[in-house]
Image (cartoon, helix red, strand yellow):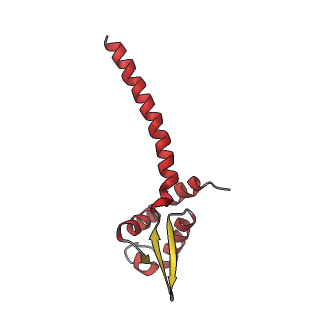
Amino acid sequence: MPTPADLLFAALADPTRRAIFQRLAREGEQTVHVLTAPSGVSQPAVSKHLAVLKRAGLVTDRRAGRETFYRARAEGLAPLIDWMSLYGAFWRERLDALDDLLGRMDT
């Protein structure tokens, strides 16, 4: 069973999905039809990309009549932020140790 982080990274690994997510984050709620026009891919392909983003928790949808509206979920990025925080602390520690070593070498 994939973890939330696995689903998130897999979803964002595709440039088309990243572009769709970025567009929804910048421009707000959109229909599949509106998202398809500038994407350069077919409507069924955009729908499949949206399904992957939804499974990863990056978008939500709502039905209004025959239309489905999608919007970005910023909180879906939490596993990425957690992962980056872990490695940010790792590199801070390493850089602090390097700074200490270089300081001792100068004296």
Furthest residue in direction left, as rendered: 106
Q: Quadrant of residue 21?
A: bottom left
Furthest residue in direction bottom, as rendered: 65
Q: Quadrant of residue 25?
A: bottom left
Q: Residue at x 45, y 71 (%)?
A: 71
Q: Residue at x 42, y 24 (%)?
A: 97
Is the residue 97 above or below the residue 104 in the image? below
Q: Can residue 14 be seen in the rendering of this structure? A: no
Is the residue 54 above or below the residue 106 in the image? below
Residue 101 screen position, x and y as percent: 39, 18
Furthest residue in direction front, as rendered: 75
Q: Can residue 104 be seen in the rendering of this structure? A: yes
How many numbered marks does the figure carry? Answer: 0
Taking depth in this image into account, of 29 and 37 the one nearest to the observer is 29
Residue 85 screen position, x and y as percent: 47, 43
Give the quadrant of the C terminus. Answer: top left
Q: Residue at x 41, y 73 (%)?
A: 40
Residue 96 screen position, x and y as percent: 40, 27
Is the residue 61 above or below the residue 106 in the image? below
Residue 1 screen position, x and y as percent: 68, 56
Taking depth in this image into account, of 33 and 75 the one nearest to the observer is 75
Furthest residue in direction right, as rendered: 1
